[in-house]
Amino acid sequence: MSVRMAVVFAAAWLAACSARSEVLRGEVVGISDGDTLTLLDDSKRTHKVRLQGIDAPERSQPFSEKSRQNLARLAFGKRVEVHESGRDRWGRIVGKVMVAPPGCEGCAATLDVGLAQIESGLAWWFRRYAKDQTPEDRAAYEAAEVRAREAKIGLWADSAPLPPWEFRRSKRKR
């Protein structure tokens, strides 16, 4: 094999490796809010996980508790797969969280919990981090938010819901 071909092969291999995300499996043992959970992995280590692609209401915002409760209904006490995309500035794992659909014990983890939060009108699609999602996930999350807005479900029942990133910014300015 020529040096040039070896370099091309190595570059392709590295690109394929970096495109694959790590998958962490375990049971959800805690729900902090509508976009953060605690996972107990198979080695009995706990991990804070931030759902990729969404932002849920902050604790003192309307719909915060409903968002947290919905995430608990979807994931608490269940086995999940976390497709890691990185870490946030607080060291939490950021990832797409997949679980078996409700009422389907023993089924494969095919339900995207973040997408379900948006579909329920209990989280925003976090456009700021859209580049970290696959094109398919970006399209699905955006479409889900549009449907929830149009149907005025969850936080979209409010005439002017305040996105959490604006809420946090206003608190910092005070």
Image (spheres, helix red, strand yellow):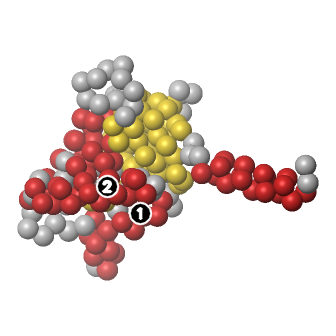
Question: Is residue 90 shown left or right of residue 147?
Answer: right
Which of 18/158 is in front? 18
Q: Amino acid at mark 2?
A: Tyr
Instruction: Tell which circle, 1 or 2, labels the residue nearer the N-terminal end.
Output: 1
Question: Given the image, on which type of amino acid does mark 1 rest?
Answer: Ala
**Secondary structure beneath disc 1?**
helix
User: Horizontal placement of 103 versus 92: left or right?
Assistant: left
Q: Secondary structure at mark 2?
A: helix
Residue 99, relative to residue 95: is it above or below? Answer: above
The answer to which image quadrant residue 147 occupies is bottom left
Within 10 Å of the Cα at label 2, are there few (<14), some (14-19), or many (20+) other Cα atoms? many
Mark 1 highlights which residue?
130
The residue under the point 86% across, 59% down is 4
**Disc 1 and disc 2 in contact, CB within 8 angstroms:** yes
User: Which is nearer the eye, 98 or 134?
Assistant: 134
Residue 44 position within the rendered picture, expressed as x and y whole percent measured from the top left: 53, 28
Residue 164: x %, y % from top left: 28, 65
Which label sits on residue 141? Answer: 2
